[in-house]
Image (tube, rainbow, N blue to C red):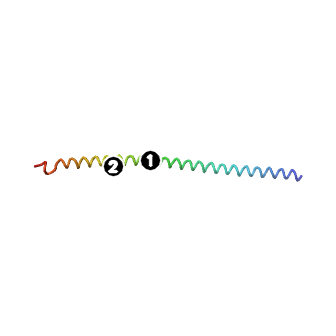
Amino acid sequence: MDRIQARFRLQQISREREKKILEFLIDKESNFAVKQHHLAQLEKAKFEIARIDYLMSSLEDDVLLYYGDISNSESDFSSDSLF
């Protein structure tokens, strides 16, 4: 009778361990999925920052060209050329 009870207890312990291992793996998997989601959001944010940097540098170039053209055109209308 003791062997039967011991075998039953070992099976019960084995099932409890399997359950804990599965819970641990599921928890790890969900943590991994969350981390993957955050990494994807981070990559998206990096892309958006790079895009904004590109747009800002393009805008800066346009502003410099615009104001550069204005300063050149103002020098064309200097007081010497008007008289």
| Disc with the residue nearer the chain's start (2 vs 1) | 1
Q: Residue at x 18, y 47 (%)?
A: 76
Tag 2 and tag 1, C-beta contact below 8 Å: no
Q: Residue at x 78, y 51 (%)?
A: 12
The amino acid pointed to by label 2 is: Glu
Question: Which residue lies most toward the left here?
Answer: 83
Looking at the picture, tell me which residue is in the foreground, 7 or 80: 80
The residue carrying mark 1 is: 48
- Residue 50 placed where, x, y %? 43, 47
Q: Residue at x 43, y 49 (%)?
A: 49
Is the residue marked by circle 1 packed among few (<14), some (14-19), or many (20+) residues within 10 Å? Answer: few
The residue carrying mark 2 is: 60
Question: Which residue lies most toward the front here?
Answer: 80
Q: Residue at x 63, y 48 (%)?
A: 29
Secondary structure state at the residue bearing disc 1: helix
- Residue 64 placed where, x, y %? 29, 48
In-image side of 39 versus 66 (left or right): right
Tell me the distance, in whole angstroms, between the alpha carbons under discs 2 and 1.
Answer: 18 Å
In-image side of 54 versus 4 (left or right): left
- Residue 31 placed where, x, y %? 60, 51
The circle on residue 57 is none
- Residue 11 placed where, x, y %? 80, 49
Question: Which residue lies most toward the right here?
Answer: 1
The amino acid pointed to by label 1 is: Glu
In-image side of 62 versus 42 (left or right): left
Is the residue marked by circle 2 packed among few (<14), some (14-19), or many (20+) residues within 10 Å? Answer: few
Which marked residue is nearer to the observer: mark 2 or mark 1? Answer: 2
- In this rendering, the count of numbered labels is 2
